[in-house]
Image (tube, rainbow, N blue to C red):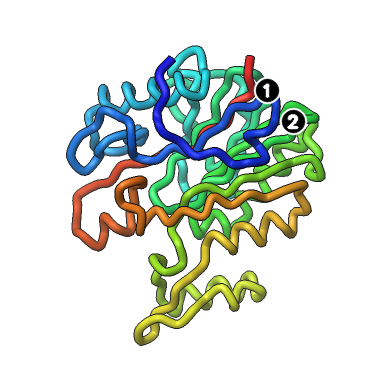
Amino acid sequence: MSTVPHTLASRIAGMNGIRHGFFGRQGGTSEGIYDSLNLGLGSDDRPKAVMRNRRLVADTIGAREVDHLLSCHQTHSDLAILATMPWGPDRPQADGMVTNLPGIALCILTADCVPILFADRKAGVIGACHAGWKGALGGICEATIEKMETIGANRKDIHAAIGPCIGQESYEVGPEFRDEFVSKAPWSENLFHPGEGDRQHFNMETFVKNRLVKAKLAWIDVIGHDTCAMEDMYFSNRRRNHRGEPDYGRQGSVIMLEG
């Protein structure tokens, strides 16, 4: 079985019957700006390279077929869906997925946004979501938890893990961004630190963590890797923008119930 580098969250790693991993950019077959484990079906990378990379991740996580590694067409929404079977190339539009079926690997794609993996081992229910700032503010984390509860999960038994995402020092935003967050989530005001001029540095990772704390889950792990700063390990859209590059790769955060 192929194995490519990935990071584990300590609590979920200790759960029997659940496989997971936060994959970075290392260990794949893509070249150039996509070097090397680009999993982004929506990128301009060579499709064959992306599928080879997804096969490597599927093998590492233990999925029987590459089409069992499911990704959505992510739109920064608050929509979480139930995954019951491979959906092929016609990916549904959603930013959260949940399942109670063994062998279905939920794969969130990111390049600075926050990936979150969820596991309720007692109920045999897992989930995963993509939280960009719009989705996080709009409630994608809560929507994913609620969707897990519809198939038997109990939030008091759910363990969550926040994966690699853009760090506060790398995440410079304008006053209109801060105003929107503070108006909708007043408690987030202390997550902004002054930058140059009217710029602010926002702690997206802690914002997501605080949303999960308010949801009263059993446990929350935080990987704590800054995707923008850690160039050798992760893809970053913000870094791409700074350099004026035409596109960027996407890393995957994956969770699966063993069959």
Identified at 40% across, 53% down, the residue is 227
**On the image, numbered disc 1 is attached to which residue?**
17
Q: Quadrant of residue 30?
A: top left
Spot occupied by residue 8 in the image (x, y as percentages of width and height): 55, 38
Q: Which mark sits nearer the N-terminus, 2 or 1?
A: 1
- Establish if 97 lies above or below 110: above
Spot occupied by residue 197 in the image (x, y as percentages of width and height): 35, 87
Identified at 77% across, 47% down, the residue is 218
**On the image, numbered disc 2 is attached to which residue?**
121
Residue 4 vs residue 140, the one in the foreground:
4
Residue 163 vs residue 185, the one in the foreground:
163
Q: Quadrant of residue 215?
A: bottom right
Horizontally, is 37 left or right of 221 in the view?
Answer: left
Spot occupied by residue 115 in the image (x, y as percentages of width and height): 52, 46
Tag 1: amino acid: Gly
Q: Which mark is residue 38?
A: none
Identified at 21% across, 43% down, the residue is 33
Quadrant including the N terminus: top left
Q: CA distance from mark 2 to mark 1?
A: 8 Å
Q: Are marks 2 and 1 in contact (CB under 8 Å)?
A: yes
Spot occupied by residue 105 in the image (x, y as percentages of width and height): 54, 25
Q: Is residue 77 visible?
A: no
Tag 1, which secondary structure? Answer: loop
Horizontally, is 255 left or right of 148 in the view?
Answer: left
Crowd class of label 2 (few under 14; some 14 to 19; many from 20; radius 10 Å): some
- Establish if 100 lies above or below 14: above
Residue 54 vs residue 2, the one in the foreground:
2
